[in-house]
Structures are given as C-alpha cells and as structure tokens.
Amino acid sequence: MKQKQTIPKTQYYKSYTDDFVHSSNRDYHLPEDYVWLDERAGHRALSSAAYRLAWIFSFFYVRLYRRIKIKNRKVLKQCRGTGYFLYGNHTQPVGDVFTPAYICGRKRIYTVAGQENLGLPWIGRLLPLLGALPVPDTLPQMKQFLTAVEQRIKEKCCVVIYPEAHVWPCCTEIRPFPLTSFRFPAEYGVPAFCMTVTYQKRRIGSRPGITLYLDGPFYPDQTVEKKEAQKKLHDEIFSCMQRRSLRSSYEYIRYREETHL
C-alpha cells in the first residue's frame, strides 16, 4: 500500500527573531527581589525533589514517547568531573526543556531561559525549582544572574543555552546566533558541547523522527584574548551544528523568508 505523501506546513518569517510559539506572558518581567541563588535548605530540598521527578519524566519522554535517537552521547563522559556548557538548536517547545536532563544523566543541569517563561501559568512557578536561570534586563539583576551561572559551573553542573533564543518548531536549519553566550566558557575556562536536533521521516505517521547529535568538548583558546576566544568558540560550534543539521532529511514545517515584491 502506497504511503500518503504529507505536504509540509509553511511558516514565513521576517527575521530570525520572530516567534512561532506565542503566549500571553510576553510582557512578564522579573520582580526586583528575584533570587537566582536560593540557598535556603527548604528550597534546595524541594528543588532536588522536583528535578528528580523531571528527570523521570524526561526518561519516558525521550525513550518511550518521542523515541529520540541520541548519537555520540559518550563524549560527555570526558568532562564528568567539571562543569560545562551545552549549546543546542531551539526547535522543541517541550523537548528542549527535558531532553538535556536525560542526556546529562546524574549531572544536574541549569538552563538559561527568557524571563517571560516564568510568567507561564503553573509551570512558570516550577521552572526555578527545575533549574531555570532567567535572563534579566536590568544591570543590578544581571550581576546576580552572572554570579549564578558561575556558581553552577563551580558546582560542576551543566548549563544549557539555546543561542538561537526563539523556538522554531521542527526547524531543520541552524539560525545565526550572536557571540554573547559564548563569553561564559571563555571567561571561566571550561569546555562546551553542542547538541543538534535533526528530523527524519517516519515509516508511519507524519510526525517526524528525531535524531540528536552530541559533539565536543570544545575548549576556549586560552592563548588569545577572551574576546577572540569567544568568537573562535562561537564559530567552531556554529560550524559543527550546521554540518550536523545536514542530517535532517524531512521538513515537517518549512520556514521561508517573507519577501515583498
């Protein structure tokens, strides 16, 4: 029996900063007294319990529900004894929250996120317990945020960053991303990895299969100035993710630039 051909949905964008996952909390801002490092014993215990439940959910989500194939996971073992950064393409609204936890196993992850995510009903209150590190927009809060990122690296955790910033579901290309977030490995002298999600056609159904590739470690060049090391790390990881993205063989959603004739 001949399989029915699925016509991909087409999304048009004006710039790479367009959002395709819309929510009513886009105007949410962190309160002035927001705390990035809550060291209270009760908070730490609650956070640990919530994270364990999230990891269990990630196991079922990755292995049983989405059946994500993970390639080259063994590279992470090279840095079990140190903190590191993990960069990924932002294409799964739910998967990008839980997949890194499954990938990193026993190593606790913390994820750099837009502050608007904390304004989501119900889940927004849970995100800090699960390890969200919201990016603020004021200088005093930015200092606290940077301190928190550094502290998690010192604790030998994994800090997850999606440099594309905006979720484009099932996008098969790597969108340009700025140098900004690559300052962290260069400044702290720690390694970085990248994870690239790719999409393939399934034999049954229209929903794409997912194969995730891990690469690294990428070390900042400590023989040059930090700005140059930051750029070299950015270029190296971007190039690697672009090569991996060519493994996508199925466009579930097509993204095309909007043109005006």
Image (tube, rainbow, N blue to C red):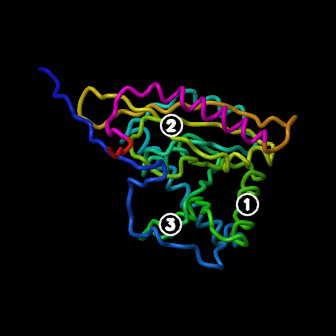
Q: Residue at x 33, y 38 (%)?
A: 254
Q: CA distance from mark 1 to mark 3?
A: 18 Å
User: Magenta residues: mostly which secondary structure?
Assistant: helix
Residue holding disc 3: 116
Quarter of the C terminus within the rendering? top left
Q: Residue at x 45, y 25 (%)?
A: 247
Residue type for callout 2: Ile
Quarter of the N terminus within the rendering? top left
Q: CA distance from mark 2 to mark 1?
A: 26 Å
123 or 253: nearer the viewer: 253
Q: Secondary structure at mark 3?
A: helix
Give the mark, 1 or 3, whose residue is nearer the N terminus.
3
What is the magenta range?
228-256
Q: Is residue 180 above or below residue 192?
A: below
Q: Is 156 on the left or on the right of 121, as rendered?
A: right
Residue 70: percent from the left, percent from the top? 50, 31
Rate crowding at label 3 as few (under 14), some (14 to 19) or many (20 or more) other CA atoms within 10 Å.
Answer: some
Q: Secondary structure at mark 1?
A: helix
Residue type for callout 1: Leu
Q: Secondary structure at mark 2?
A: loop
Q: Is 138 on the left or on the right of 252, as rendered?
A: right
Residue 133 painted magenta: no
Residue holding disc 2: 174
Residue holding disc 1: 146
